[in-house]
Image (spheres, rainbow, N blue to C red):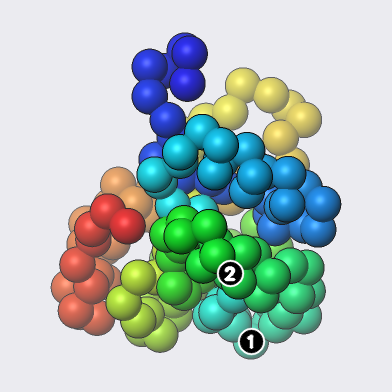
Amino acid sequence: VSVMGKQPDFIDGHQHIHQFPFIRDILLQLLKEKNFTGWIRNLQHPIYLPHYRFKTHMLSALGSNALAKACQTYQFSQNEYFAGIYDFKQTDYAELNQYWLAQAKDHLLIMCHPSLSTPSEQDSIQHARIQEYQYFCSDQFPLDCQKNGIQLTRL
C-alpha cells in the first residue's frame, strides 16, 4: 500500500497459501482491519481438466470452502469459478484454455503466469510462461473468447 499508494485489487497467495488454515484467518483479519475492498481468489468451484483432476481437487480441498465461508462473513468479494490448474508441461496451452473457456460460467477466473521471458534459469515453469504469453497475445485468444461467448471484465 505504501509503495503503490492504494490497496491491492485482489488477494492471490502464491501457491494458494492464502486459503490455508491459520494463514487464512490472520490474512482475513488483517484485511478487515485495513478495510480491504478488493476481492479474494477462491478455488471452491474449479473447472477440472481430465488429466489434472487430482491436483485440482487437492488444491481446492486445501481450504477453499472455509475461505468462501469466511469471505462471506467478512463480506469480501470472491471469484465464483476457477480454472488454470495444470502441470506447466503441456505443450499446447491454447488447447487447455479452449477447454476452460468452453466450460466457463459467469465470474470465472483463469489463473495464468504469462511472461515474454524470464531472467532466471531457476524458473521451472519458464516454458509454460512463454506459451501462455504467446497465446494471450495471439489472434487465437480473442477468437476463442468470441466462440464461447466470453466477455472479459473486471471482477
**Inter-mark Cα distance, 1 to 2:** 25 Å
Question: In the visual, does 61 lie left or right of 13?
Answer: right
Question: In the visual, does 5 lie left or right of 19?
Answer: left
Q: Which residue is mark 1?
A: 50
Please rate how many residues cluster around mark 1, counting C-alpha atoms within 10 Å: few if below 14, some from 14 to 19, many from 20.
Answer: few
Which residue is pictured at 55% across the width and 65% down the height? 73
User: Where's the C terminus, which quadrant?
Assistant: bottom left
User: Which residue is the extreme one toward the top?
Assistant: 3
Q: Amino acid at mark 2?
A: Ala
- Nearest the viewer among 3 and 130 is 3
Q: State the SS at label 1.
A: helix
Q: In x, y percent, where is residue 89?
A: 68, 59
Q: Name the quadrant containing residue 133.
A: top left
Question: In the visual, does 21 lie left or right of 117?
Answer: right
Q: State the SS at label 2.
A: helix
Up/down of 138 relative to 51, above or below: above
- Nearest the viewer among 59 and 77 is 77
Which residue is pictured at 73% across the width and 52% down the height? 25
Q: In x, y percent, where is residue 21?
A: 81, 58
1 or 2: mark nearer the eye = 2
Which residue is pictured at 73% across the width and 44% down the height? 26
User: Which residue is the extreme one toward the right?
Assistant: 22
Give yes or no for contact between labels 1 and 2 (Cβ–Cβ under 8 Å).
Answer: no
Q: Amino acid at mark 1?
A: Pro
Q: Which residue is mark 2?
A: 68
Which comes sooner in the sequence, label 1 or label 2? 1
Would you say residue 42 is visible in this rendering? no
Q: Name the quadrant containing residue 149.
A: bottom left
Please rate how many residues cluster around mark 2, counting C-alpha atoms within 10 Å: few if below 14, some from 14 to 19, many from 20.
Answer: many
